[in-house]
Amino acid sequence: MKVLIVSDNHREKNIIENLSKTIAADYYIHLGDSEFISDDPELDAYLTVLGNVDFDRSYQRHGKLKDIFFTHGHLFGIKHDRTTLAEKAAGLDAKYALYGHSHVAKVERINDVYCINPGSISFSRNEYPESYAILDTVKDVVQYYNRKNELMDTIQLENL
């Protein structure tokens, strides 16, 4: 299964919708802080969750898709540690825990859970420029792309 993961566009229009229209994936997940209303047409292709600056409270706080748990991350203290996030995912029999919030693209293994942050599509806070990620659950690979859809990095999860 191929999953496009994006987060933290903070009101920037068109970038989210353009990704879902130009990149083929089985699922599209937005990890919060779009600052759009939950029924904004730009998010039509996406499974979505509530970010800390999303004021439309009709978003779900968390979601689960097969063996993927996804959330914004602010409710799990992810800026300090991802252990609580990984424990929540493991408790739901999820192999992957997707989160945003920090604007830092990152992949790490905590116990038997792969914690994956796609970075921010609009305001990066690490060495990657603005980014999104694609998770391939069949190959256990995460690929990071910049806003021009150029591949920046490929991470084989079994090597973590």
Image (tube, rainbow, N blue to C red):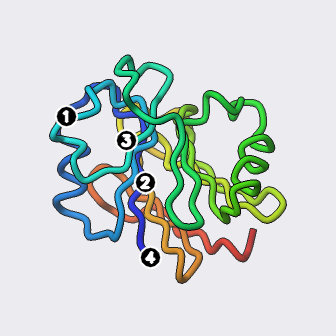
User: Is residue 49 visible in this depiction of the protein?
Assistant: yes
Of the two numbered discs 2 and 1 in the rendering, the one whose residue sits closer to the viewer: 1
Q: Tag on residue 1?
A: 4
Residue 47: percent from left, percent from top: 37, 50
User: In the rendered structure, which disc, 1 or 4, sits on the residue that comes first in sequence?
Assistant: 4
Amino acid identity at mark 2: Ile
Residue beneath the point at 73% across and 47% down: 88
How much space separates mark 4 and mark 3, taking CA atoms? 22 Å
Residue 111: percent from left, percent from top: 84, 60
User: In the rendered structure, which disc, 3 or 1, sits on the residue that comes first in sequence?
Assistant: 1
Question: Can you identify the residue that label 2 sits on?
Answer: 5
How much space separates mark 2 and mark 1, taking CA atoms? 18 Å
Question: Can you identify the residue that label 3 sits on?
Answer: 121
Q: Tag on residue 40?
A: 1
Of the two numbered discs 3 and 1 in the rendering, the one whose residue sits closer to the viewer: 1
Residue beneath the point at 54% across and 41% down: 62
Q: Is residue 15 above or below residue 97?
A: above
SS class of the residue under badge 2?
strand
Marks 3 and 2 close (CB-CB < 8 Å): no
Marks 3 and 1 close (CB-CB < 8 Å): no
- Left or right: 33, with 11 as reference point: right
How much space separates mark 4 and mark 2, taking CA atoms? 13 Å
Of the two numbered discs 3 and 2 in the rendering, the one whose residue sits closer to the viewer: 2
Amino acid identity at mark 3: Ile
User: In the rendered structure, which disc, 4 or 3, sits on the residue that comes first in sequence?
Assistant: 4
SS class of the residue under badge 4?
loop
